[in-house]
Amino acid sequence: MRSGLQAVQCTVAARCDRERVRVCTRPKVQRGGFYGFKMASSRGIRNQVFATGVMNLINLSHGAALGWVSPYLPVLADPDQTILETGPVTVDQGSWIGSILCLGALFGAFLYGYLVEKIGIKRTLQALVIPHSAFWIITYLASSVYQLFLARFLAGLTGGGIIVVFPLFIADIADKKIRGILGSFLALTSNGGILLMYVVGAVLSYHTVALTMLALPVLFTVLMCFVPDTPQTCLKMGKPVAAERSFMYYRGIQTSAEKTTAQRQEFDNMEKFIEHNACQKSRLTLADFTTPEAKLGIFIGVFLMFINQYSGMFTILTYAASIFAGVGSTLSPNMSAIIMGAIQMVGTLSSFVFVDHAGRKVLLLISTFGTGLGLLLLAIYNWLTVNGSNVWVQDYGWFPIVSLSAAVYLFSIGLCSIPFFVLPELLPPKICNAGNTLSMVSVTIFAFISLKIFPILVETIALYGALGLFAGISFFGVIVIALIVPETKGKNLISPQSV
């Protein structure tokens, strides 16, 4: 996991972009002039969007794997089900089906972080297909709940690889103008996969959906053959010629004659930073983690991951149909889940607009408070229905889907994604790799605990108690964010001495 390198490379790209603009505003910079540069820039952006879209096909399918629990866990728990020879799934077994994915993600983060260093980003991305396809195949063939445990663990292995490798790929290839948007595709396609599973889960049988979803990893495998590895990976692997070809592809340069002075300098700087980062790795010491900046950055990173998970939204999205069945909504559980998934997609798209205008901290505060408020209102509604106020069910049956959709929307515009891409802006460059690793490990542990204990919490303190607990944690998060999280919008990702 090379988020330190990611931060360095992003800043180098930003510097070179500024130089390129200065160069291109002069008359007759290179053959083709300003118009020729604009054409190359346009081609480069198209290539970057294409590569990002192909890469996110596997993330779309992984999102479907995340959403799979919502429509099919109730099917597996049905006393009349004939899918598993071990019988209907119990509450405890259901909690393992939901949560063991996070243990797989924990192992996947380490495994794919190691593979990135050994075989490069593109081959590591292609390797994601192996455990992910195995998830759908085992799900189709499973006759025992323990086989489903294995399948979900493999799905988590894929997810762990995705959160490690995808940000590195985007940082390596993206132009500064669209880097934020391309990075937000991660949340968009993941949420799109969840919504896709909510929809197909309402119409396709258990076995049919597993076979159908195999089409996405197959398509991903084919299209990845047309996506070059990143220039940084090629340089690390000692392939300067391939690195230059890759650089030209992602910058939209068709011939060497089209290169501007700034672009040549950008590639030279890239080579220097790869060498610099390799030297820096050997100098990392314990003292680097004890500075006030390092301790604060790591604390904020881990805390944001804590709030990301214990706001309860990932848990609610995982168990959506079961929650709507118990909360008192007059809509069918699957239809409620579909509506909520669509609202989440709208929220993710909205974040594209807000994140670079409103700022990180403002969005985090609005998002976290709104999530807590929506869950608190839903908890109050559920308490009123459980305690005999049937008038609430009869006259306000629309309230659960409205309050929860509002919470999902507000979660999606900030708290869903900002904790992940804000880390390089919070951590000192030298420890960014280690700090990011710690944060990714922490979020998988928090997610596992949250998913594992939620069904047990519902059995113990009722659904309204669990929702109220998540709301209280969200409000606590608002206070901490307001007091200690700095605004990092527009922050330079590396100090001058790191260059």
Image (cartoon, helix red, strand yellow):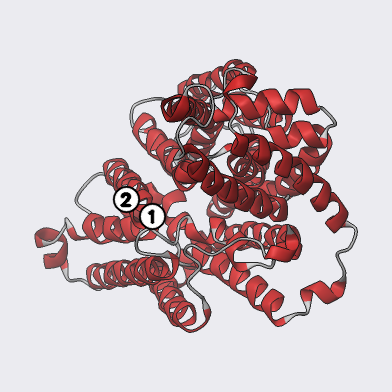
Q: Are marks 1 and 2 in contact (CB under 8 Å)?
A: yes
Residue at mark 2? 350
Res. 93 visible in picture: no
As drawn, the residue found furthest toward the right would be 282
Q: CA distance from mark 1 to mark 2?
A: 8 Å
Judge left or right: residue 33 versus residue 11.
left
Expressed as whole percent of the image width and height from the top left, the position of residue 13 reads 60, 46
Amino acid carrying mark 1 in the image:
Ser
Judge left or right: residue 261 versus residue 388.
right
The foreground one among 119 and 7 is 7
Judge left or right: residue 46 versus residue 243.
left
Who comes first in sequence, dot 1 or dot 2?
2
Say which residue appears at 81% left-offset and 37% top-offset.
236
The foreground one among 412 and 328 is 412
Say which residue appears at 48% left-offset and 37% top-offset.
24
The foreground one among 488 and 327 is 488
Q: Is residue 260 above or below residue 317?
A: above
Residue at mark 1? 412
Q: Is residue 251 above or below residue 304?
A: above
Expressed as whole percent of the image width and height from the top left, the position of residue 81 reads 47, 33
Q: Quadrant of residue 290?
A: bottom right
